[in-house]
Image (tube, grey):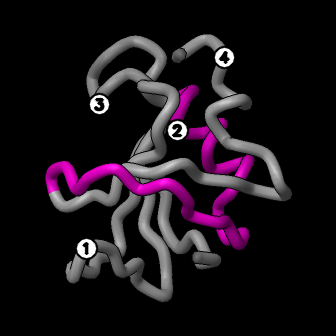
Amino acid sequence: MKTKVIEIIDGDTFRVSPEWKWDDKTGDTVRPKGYNTPEKGEEGYEEAKEELINLIDGETVELKNATNISYGRLVCDVYYNGNNIADYFPDYQ
């Protein structure tokens, strides 16, 4: 599914429009698979968030291979320009 990134929440969570649909559920928050960035208050949080903003904020991404919903977020592979965004975050894999 292709959708537009409308808000970056942190380095590994963002909101999209239109909403995703998976397993009879819908939502607007996505958690990409393949990497994990620092949480708010942890060292590196702001840098990771800024990296994701620079990469996909306002851009169209493709959501693939969803595995579950965690804390209301669809956990899936996220592709931008044909590349898995996890590949842009090697320091967090």
Left or right position of 44 against 83: left
- Give the alpha-carbon distance from disc 4 to disc 2, as whole Å: 14 Å
Query: Along the polypeptide, which appears first: circle 2 or circle 3?
Result: 3
> x and y percent of residue 68 in the render?
26, 52
Which SS class for mark 1? loop
Cα–Cα span, label 4 and label 1: 30 Å
Q: Position of residue 36 (x, y in %)?
A: 42, 25
Q: Where residue 40 is drawn, which disc sits there?
A: 3
- Cα separation, mark 4 vs mark 3, equals 20 Å
Q: Which residue is mark 4?
A: 90
Residue type beneath disc 2: Lys
- Which contiguous range is marked in magenta? 47-71
Marks 2 and 1, the one that precedes in the sequence: 1
Q: Which residue is mark 2?
A: 49
Closer-to-camera residue (92/66)? 66
Residue shown at 35% from the left, 74% from the top: 28
